[in-house]
Amino acid sequence: MYTSEVQLYDLAKELKNIHNIDKDISHYLTDSQKAELLYVLENNQAVLKLIKLLTAKNQTLRKNNRRIGRQRNVAEKDLKKQKDKNEELNREISQLKYELIELQSQIGGGLASFQEMLLADILERSEILKFIQELINAVQESK
């Protein structure tokens, strides 16, 4: 059994070294299938060319997948940064809304107080005006 495992490993290694067929692909083949594939590749130029084209395409796809994976990682990090920034801005907006409500209530209370003072002043002045008017009337009547 040990020799069989070594033989499988050697065939997979030979497929990789000579024909650039990755072990992650060749491990699906049995030992006899690997040996048969090596024989076919050595004796059939059309199959050899096809395998070379497929392995080249596989390498291109692998490179693209790595590049896309890196881009995805960068995009995920950027997304997380944007989400964190958004959360911080939402917290700031909530704080500003709270402060605005507090200011509005303070201003509203101040305005109400100011309005009361103005009304009291107007009433006081109207009382003074009434008194003056009564004095004028009294003086005119006394003449």
Image: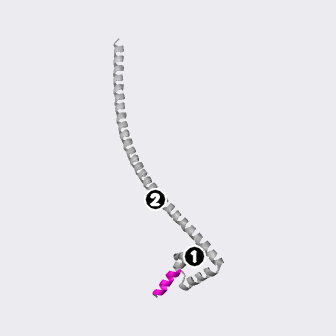
Q: Position of residue 41 (x, y in %)?
A: 61, 79
**Mark seen at residue 77:** 2
| Residue farthest toward the right in the current orientation of the protein | 46
Quadrant (top left/top right/bottom left/bottom right) for the C terminus: top left
Q: CA distance from mark 2 to mark 1?
A: 39 Å
Q: Position of residue 2 (x, y in %)?
A: 45, 86
Labels 2 and 1: the sequence-earlier one? 1
For the point 53% across and 81% down, which residue is it? 11
Q: Is residue 27 visible?
A: no
Q: In this picture, is 123 found above or below 64?
A: above
Q: Nearer the viewer, mark 2 or mark 1?
A: 1
In this rendering, position of residue 43 left or right of residue 128: right
The kind of secondary structure element at disc 2 is: helix
- Nearer to the camera, 42 or 124: 42
Q: Position of residue 30 (x, y in %)?
A: 54, 84
Q: In this picture, is 66 found above or below 111?
A: below
Q: Which residues are magenta?
A: 2-11
For the point 63% across and 75% down, which residue is it? 50
Q: Which residue is the site of mark 1?
A: 19
Q: Amino acid at mark 2?
A: Lys
